[in-house]
Amino acid sequence: MNRRRFVISAFACVTELSTPSPSRSQSGAIQPDLAQLAASNRLRSFNRTAAPLTDAARTGARLSEAPGDGVAYLEGIEFANGTIELDVRGRDVQQQSFPGVAFHGVDGATYDAVYFRPFNFRAEDLDRRKRAVQYISHPDYPWQKLRAEHPGKYEQAVTPVPDPNGWFRVRIVVASPKVSVFVEGANEPSLIVSQLSARGKGLIGLWAGNYSGGDFANLKLIPA
């Protein structure tokens, strides 16, 4: 999908949303108001609920905790190639914090995703540190299968290392099939993978893993 098609799809979403509408730059970047979308039930959620969030200067959305994985899609936006930027906050609680982003989604079970394990950011165990950011492609390639069959390929440490209880900035560059993940303004990616799905476009949304919620703010989508 080219840039013009992305902007048209996003514009269709904007016209359906209640005010205030997302701002758009001259480059065609889309900046959805996550707090407004959550407050007006304009996020299409699977196995999660989304609530508006205000934290100091940030406004955004919070996904609830629940068993199993969950996603809240931005309805009407079809994302192919481009850059996803957002602020993310999880918790330094082992095996209970897995916030991330789903893209090229179809429904609650079929999507690609990049997510983080904040409890591993500063772990003393070096093996755990190397499992701080993860790529998955559901339903065929969950993390368990990828770790068992391709150890160290689809999960890595993050550099620089963020506060595991604080907000951190994420930039995900999707140039199918290549996906690159940057944190905290780094010039070098923490993770580079080739997508395992054949989907070149689809829904985009906020994601949380098993028994995890997550906080999200300042989402920005920049078409390629």
Image (tube, helix red, strand yellow):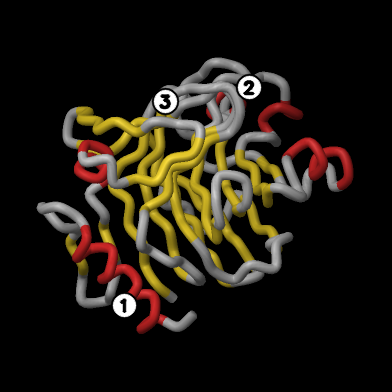
| Distance (Cα) linking label 2 and label 1 | 44 Å
Q: Nearer the viewer, residue 73 or 145?
A: 73
**Which residue has dot 2 on it?**
123
Which residue is at 25% across, 31% downward?
53
Q: Is any part of residue 24 visible from this angle? A: yes
Give the crowd class for mark 1: few <14, some 14-19, many >=20 residues within 10 Å.
some
Which residue is at 54% across, 68% downward?
201
In primary-sequence order, the first of circles 2 and 1 is: 1
Quadrant that contains the C terminus: bottom left
| Residue 64 disc label | 3
| Distance (Cα) linking label 3 and label 1 | 31 Å
Label 3 secondary element: loop
Q: Residue furthest left?
A: 19
Q: Residue furthest right?
A: 149
Q: Position of residue 90 (x, y in %)?
A: 45, 27
| Distance (Cα) linking label 2 and label 3 | 25 Å
**Which residue has dot 1 on it?**
8
Give the crowd class for mark 2: few <14, some 14-19, many >=20 residues within 10 Å.
some
Q: Nearer the viewer, residue 189 or 91?
A: 91
Q: Is residue 157 left or right of residue 106?
A: right
State if disc 1 and disc 3 touch (CB < 8 Å): no
Q: Is residue 3 left or right of residue 126?
A: left
Which residue is at 26% across, 71% downward?
11
